[in-house]
Image (cartoon, rainbow, N blue to C red):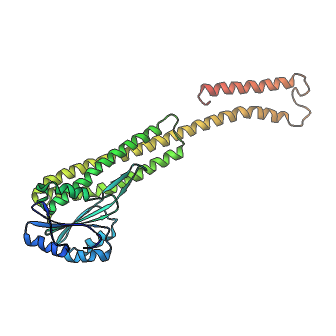
Amino acid sequence: MLPVIVDCAIYRDGRRTEGPEDFSDALDAARASGDAFLWIGMYEPTEAEFDHVSREFGLHPLAVEDALKAHQRPKLEVYDDSLFVVLKPVLYEESTDTVSAGELMLFIGDSFVVTVRHGEGAPLAAVRHRLEEDPTVLRHGPTAVLYAVSDAVVDHYIEVAAELQVDLEELEADVFAPNASDAKNTAARIYGFKRQVLEFRRATNPLLQPMDRLAVGDVPFVHDHARPFFRDVADHLTRASEHIEGLDRLLSDALAAHLAQTGLRQNDDMRKISAWAAMAAVPTMVAGIYGMNFDHMPELHQSWGYPVVVLVMVGVCLGLHRMFKRRGWL
C-alpha cells in the first residue's frame, strides 16, 4: 500500500471487513462480491503516488489533474466511469480568529470511493468512524460516504459561522465604543474580517449548485433514495451561506459607520482648529499693525494706548470664544 494512503478498507453490508492489503486486489474483491465497496483515503498525494490509483480505478485525467493541483472551486462533475466532487472544508483558528480552507475531493464510482485531502481543515477519520458505527447508513455504499462527508463539511460551516458572529459582535462593540481605538487600526480589523468572510464565501457559495443537483437531479453513482438526505444538506448549506452573506453586509455597514464616525471626528477637529486659529488671528493682526514703524498712528503716543489695545484684543478673543462655544466648535 502506498504510504500516502491514510486508510483503505472494504465495506460489506455496512461493516468493515478484512481484505487484501493491495488496493488493486481489494477493488477486485469488492466488485466480485457485488454488495461491497472499497474506500481509500489519501492525503496530499504527489503525481507519481496518485498515478497508480488513477489508472487502477479508471479516473478521468482532468479530474485527476484537479485533485493533484488543488486550489479548486467546489463543484460536481460527471464522467463516464466516476463522479468527481470538490468540497472546501473550513477551519477556524481561535488563537488568531482567522478562517482557513482546505480541499477535499471525492471520486465515486463502481464499488469504490477515493477521497483526496489537502490542508488541515478536512479530517475524515471522525466521519469514517461515525459511519462505521452506523451500518444502516454505510450499507448504502459510496452514496452514504458522499452524503456523510458533505453533511460533516456543511455542518462545520454553521459552527464556524457562529464563531464569526461572536467575533463580529465584539468588533461592532469596539467600533461604536465612545473611546474607540485609533481609526487606522479599526479599519484594518474590519478589512481583515472581510477577508475572512470572503474566504468563507469561496467555500460555501459555489457549493450551492452541486448540492441542489444532488438533491433534485439524476446524478450517476448516487442512489435516488438519497435525495432527501442531500436536500437536508442543501438546506443547511443555504442557511450557512445566508449567514455569511449577512455577516458581510453587517461588516460593510460597520465599515461605513466607522468611516462616517472618522469623518465627523475629523470635521470636529477641523472646527476646533479653525476656532482657535480665528481667536489667534485677532491679536496677531493687531500686534502686527502696531508693530509697523510708522510715526503717525492712532493713540501711539497716548499713555492709555497700550492697555486699551490689549483690552480690545482680549475682549475680541473672549467674544469669539463664547460664540464658538455656543455653536459647539469648542
Residue 43 versus residue 80: which sits nearer the camera? Answer: 43
Residue 325: tell me if it is visible.
Answer: yes
Residue 323 higher or lower than 229, as above or below: above
Report the side of 145 relative to 305 (left or right).
left
Give how far across and how far down residue 279 sits, in percent.
71, 31
Corner quadrant of residue 311: top right
Give how far across and how far down residue 45 sits, in percent.
31, 71
Q: Quadrant of the C terminus?
A: top right
Residue 37 higher or lower than 292, as above or below: below
Q: Residue at x 60, y 25 (%)?
A: 326
Residue 202 versus residue 267: which sits nearer the camera? Answer: 202
Give how far across and how far down residue 296 sits, in percent.
90, 31
Q: Residue at x 28, y 51 (%)?
A: 156
Residue 211: tell me if it is visible.
Answer: no
Count of number-bearing discs: 0
Q: Residue at x 80, y 26 (%)?
A: 310
Residue reaching furthest to the front? 18
Corner quadrant of residue 15: bottom left
Q: Quadrant of the N terminus?
A: bottom left
Residue reaching furthest to the top? 304
Give how far across and how far down residue 271 sits, in percent.
61, 35
Residue 8 versus residue 330: which sits nearer the camera? Answer: 8
Report the side of 264 relative to 54 (left or right).
right
